[in-house]
Image (tube, rainbow, N blue to C red):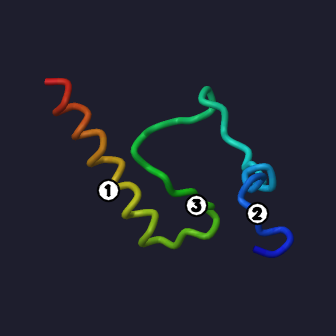
């Protein structure tokens, strides 16, 4: 091994990524962020249908 390749202190060089605090995480089954100003009419209609389907699923789940 050459200089700088030792495994002894390898983990000290790793940069840590910041994490979202647990209190700020909203779990609704969706993991997509999308700016509405970039949406076209077809996308907006698809979103309406998806939201309606989600509401029907919630109502069905409660019964």
What label does residue 6 carry, if any? 2
What label does residue 49 carry, if any? 1
Q: Secondary structure at mark 2?
A: loop
| 3D distance between C-alphas at marks 3 and 2 | 44 Å
Instruction: Look at the image and tell me in which quarter the C terminus lies.
Output: top left
Dot 1 crowding, Cα within 10 Å, few <14, some 14–19, many 20+: few
Mark 2 vs mark 1: in front: 2
Image coordinates of residue 56 in percent, x first then y, are 23, 40
* First-in-chain label (2 vs 1): 2
> Which residue matches tag 3?
34
Q: Of 10 and 27, which appears nearest the observer? A: 10
Q: Of 23 and 62, which appears nearest the observer? A: 23
User: Residue sitting at 45 percent across and 63 percent down?
Assistant: 44
User: Residue sitting at 20 percent across and 24 percent down?
Assistant: 62
Q: Is residue 34 left or right of residue 63?
A: right
* 58 is higher (above) or lower (below) than 16: above
Q: Disc 3, disc 1: CB below 8 Å?
A: no
Image coordinates of residue 49 in percent, x first then y, are 32, 56
Image coordinates of residue 52 in percent, x first then y, are 30, 47
* First-in-chain label (3 vs 1): 3
């Amino acid at each position: 091994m050459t200089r700088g390749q030792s495994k002894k202190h390898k983990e000290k060089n790793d940069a840590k990524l910041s994490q979202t605090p647990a209190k700020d995480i909203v779990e609704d089954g969706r993991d997509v962020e999308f700016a509405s100003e970039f949406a076209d009419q077809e996308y907006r209609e698809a979103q309406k249908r998806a939201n309606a389907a989600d509401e029907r699923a919630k109502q069905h789940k409660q019964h």
